[in-house]
Structure formats: C-alpha cells, structure tokens
Image (cartoon, rainbow, N blue to C red):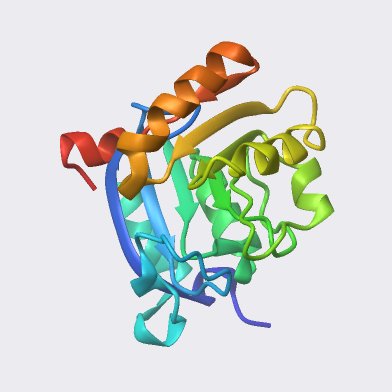
C-alpha cells in the first residue's frame, strides 16, 4: 500500500492569497489548484488546468510542506475539477496539521476527503451529482446569460437549507450581468452577490 504522503496529484499551481469569491471573500487562504477537468466551460479562466498531463505530479508531502510554514489557516483545493482525484489523503494530512479544508467543485465527481466547507458551482455543461448537491455548504452559480437565473434557482431548491446562496457574474460579461444580479438579489434576498475581487485588486 502506498503511504499517504507519497500519493501523487497533478498540481497546476499553489499559492497564498485571499479568497476572492463567495462566503469567505476577503479571507486569507492557501490555494492548491489541481489539474484536470472535463466539464468544458466555454468561459473558463483557467483552461490551462484542463489537461492534467501538462502539469507535474507531486506527492502530498511536497504539496503540503510549504503550506505548513505559512500563516494560512484555510486551504482551498480547487481546479480544474479537484474531485477528479481522490482527496482523502491530501485532506487528512492538511487537517492533521490544523488547517480547515475547503473544496471548490462543479460537483460532477463523488466527494472525497473530509472538507470543512464545500463550494458547489454547478455548470450547464455537465450537471452535478445529487450527493454533491446534498453536501454543499455554499452554492455559487456563475451567471453568463439571463437564462442562468433559472438554473441557479433549480439548484437552490435542492441544496441543504443552511447552504449559502451566491450569484456571480461571468467575468467578461460583468459590466452587463452585474446590474441584473443586483436587481435579482434585491428581488430575491435569499441570494447574495459574489464578485471576483481578486481580479479587481490584481492578486492571484
């Protein structure tokens, strides 16, 4: 049996910054961006992450070594689609070191690891699994077209009652979409507005 710390995961990048989106917006966090995704969002801003073969395989020990020396208390595992990979080992090592583990996912693969927070961002290109919808701590729906509001409501009706609800404008259309979201949130205040503040303040 391979020791947990020797398991390999494809890592596109790993960095310390602030969370730019959703419920934890503005909070310091270490991000691990795993490579590999088959959802195929046409507006994806990290398409370089799609092909896992283009990124180095790293052991969990190597992935977590630099994080342990940082002041981070939250580690966000994102992608790509991070749940294409089994996250049990990575999650266990991080939590044993005292970090809160957050996962950002489209929900198209089974949940692995033991996350403290699950941000579900469902996409029309490939629908999420029911079990992921049931595990969501936060529902963050990207609004690319006005028809996406109905898509957001579909999943808002399925997530747990305590799940936080956010609408986020697709970045390239934010000038046109953000005013629509503002009016929608005013009409339906169960929703909140998520903006990608990291892009406005030019941090990773």
Near-viewer residue (122 or 76): 122
Question: In the rendering, at what x and y percent does residue 47 appear?
Answer: 38, 70
Q: Is residue 126 left or right of residue 144?
A: right
Near-viewer residue (171 or 146): 146
Which residue does the image show at 51% across and 46% down from the upper left? 145
Near-viewer residue (89 or 135): 135
Which residue does the image show at 47% across and 36% down from the upper left? 168
Which residue does the image show at 46% across and 27% down from the upper left? 180
Question: In the rendering, at what x and y percent does residue 91 appear?
Answer: 58, 54
Residue 174 visible somewhere in the drawing:
yes
Q: In which quarter of the image is residue 33?
A: bottom left
Which residue does the image show at 76% across and 40% down from the upper left? 154
Q: Quadrant of residue 137?
A: top right
Up the image or down, 59 lies above or below 172; here it is below
Residue 71 visible somewhere in the drawing:
no
Question: In the rendering, at what x and y percent does residue 177 appear?
Answer: 41, 36
Quarter in which the N terminus is drawn: bottom right
User: Going by the picture, which residue comes out furthest to the left?
Assistant: 202
Question: In the rendering, at what x and y percent does residue 88 appear?
Answer: 65, 61
Up the image or down, 166 lies above or below 16; here it is above
């Amino acid at each position: 049996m391979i020791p947990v710390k020797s398991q390999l995961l494809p890592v596109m990048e790993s960095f310390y910054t602030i969370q730019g989106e959703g419920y934890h917006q503005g909070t310091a966090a270490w991000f691990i961006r795993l490579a590999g995704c088959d959802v195929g969002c046409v507006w994806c801003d990290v398409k370089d992450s799609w092909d896992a073969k283009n990124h180095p395989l790293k052991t969990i020990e190597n992935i977590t070594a630099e994080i342990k020396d940082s002041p981070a208390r939250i580690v966000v595992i994102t992608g790509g689609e991070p749940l294409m990979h089994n996250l049990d080992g990575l999650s266990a090592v991080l939590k044993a070191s005292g970090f809160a583990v957050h996962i950002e996912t489209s929900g198209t693969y089974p949940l692995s690891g033991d996350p403290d927070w699950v941000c579900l961002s469902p996409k029309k290109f490939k629908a999420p699994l029911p079990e992921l919808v049931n595990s969501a701590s936060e529902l963050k729906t990207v609004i690319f077209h006005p028809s996406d509001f109905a898509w957001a409501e579909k999943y808002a009706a399925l997530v747990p009652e305590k799940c936080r609800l956010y609408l986020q404008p697709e970045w390239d259309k934010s000038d046109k979409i953000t005013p629509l979201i503002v009016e929608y949130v005013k009409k339906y205040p169960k929703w909140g507005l998520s903006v990608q503040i990291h892009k406005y303040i030019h941090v990773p």
